[in-house]
Image (cartoon, helix red, strand yellow):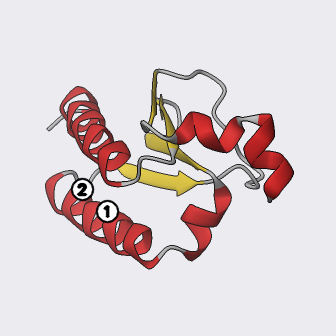
Amino acid sequence: MNSLEATSLIKEALNGFVTLFPKTRVRYEFDINANVHCVEIIPNHIYQLKNDYIEWENNFTNNFIALYPDQNIYFFSEDAIVGIKNIQFELEGSKFAELTSPIYKATI
């Protein structure tokens, strides 16, 4: 199976992800030189602390590895040293804008 098929699977999963986690934003990039699919999950507190997220990521990663053992996938958040340089896919959950509004930030 090739990287285009893997990318399609990832995009489909991320569409479902932002429905399950409506206060998130995801960005995706495939780094062909490293043969790694990169997925940025924002905000960091969902990535770090939310058990539902951790379970989702573990399940997806295990499924991905079973289907594409010759490819890599990497999830990270905004505090990671690495980042996405060439956004190929981006989605925001229906409530993500609430997190970025000045009113929400003032109450944190």
Viewer-side residue, 13 vs 67: 13
Task: Identify the image quadrant of the N terminus.
Answer: top left
The quarter in which the C terminus is drawn is bottom right
Residue 28 image position (x, y, % from top left): 47, 33
Q: Nearer the viewer, residue 70 or 21?
A: 21
Neighbour class for label 1 at 10 Å: few (<14), some, many (≥20)?
some
Q: Residue at left 49%, top 44%?
A: 39
Q: Which residue matches tag 2?
A: 64
Quarter where residue 84 is shown: top right
As drawn, is 104 to the left or to the right of 67? right
Left or right: where 2 falls relative to 61: left
Residue in the picture at 44% in, 78% down? 51
Instruction: Locate residue 29, reporting x and y percent.
Output: 49, 31
* SS for dot 2: helix
Q: Amino acid at mark 2?
A: Phe
Residue marked by disc 1: 61
